[in-house]
Amino acid sequence: MRIGFQKYIKELNNGFSLWYSAGIIPYLHFDYPKRDANDRRTTSSGFGFSPAGFLVKKYHSKWITPFAQTTGGIILMDEYFPTDKGRKLNFTFDITVGNVFTINSFSDLSLGYKFHHISNAQTGSENPGLDSNFLFLTLSFH
């Protein structure tokens, strides 16, 4: 679950608009094969904050508003992650592309693809990263 914030910055060329975005991840949970435990299924939980993000979108119509977004931040896990030589504190970034469908004046539906990366940025004895690729469907209220 992510609680997000977006603030309009300015209009760009050809009808594109630039937005600042940030988010809080009050709870995240991973179920993954741990490399240094012979790929044994392991779970880990934490929370995060993504204060650095930008979104570019182009409004065509109520049903066609493509966008691209990137965010960066930190996550704090309950144990060393994703291996025993990782860290509890990790850095994260993602790249997202999709489309916004306007439902009414106070809600939107977004559909898209996200690439998400987590690693400790060489601050641990190893830098084991974890990459995720997924499709999403988001209901937004404004």
Image (tube, rainbow, N blue to C red):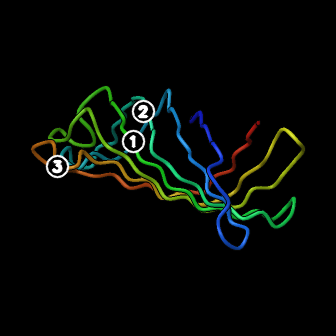
How far is mark 1 from mark 3, CA to CA? 15 Å
Callout 2 amino acid: Gly
Dividing the picture into quadrants, the one containing residue 79 is top left
Q: Residue at x 56, y 36 (%)?
A: 2
Q: Is residue 4 above or below residue 136?
A: above
Residue 89 vs 35, above or below: the answer is: above
Is the C-beta separation of discs 1 and 3 under 8 Å?
Answer: no
**Which residue in the protein does label 2 denote?**
48
Give the Cα distance between marks 1 and 2: 7 Å
Instruction: Tell me which numbered mark, 1 or 2, is placed earlier along the sequence.
Output: 2
Instruction: Note whether 54 is above or below 68 in the view shown.
Output: above
Q: Nearer the viewer, residue 10 or 40?
A: 10
- Gap between marks 3 and 2, in whole Å? 19 Å
Q: Secondary structure at mark 2?
A: strand
Q: Which residue is mark 3?
A: 122
Q: Which amino acid is tagged 3?
A: Gln
> In the picture, which quadrant includes the N terminus?
top right
Q: Mark 3 or mark 2: name the one nearer the start of the chain.
A: 2
Q: Position of residue 8 (x, y in %)?
A: 66, 47
Does residue 103 appear left or right of residue 4 in this picture? right
Which residue is identified by label 1?
A: 73
Which SS class for mark 1?
A: strand
The earlier-in-sequence mark between 1 and 3 is 1
Q: Amino acid at mark 1?
A: Gly
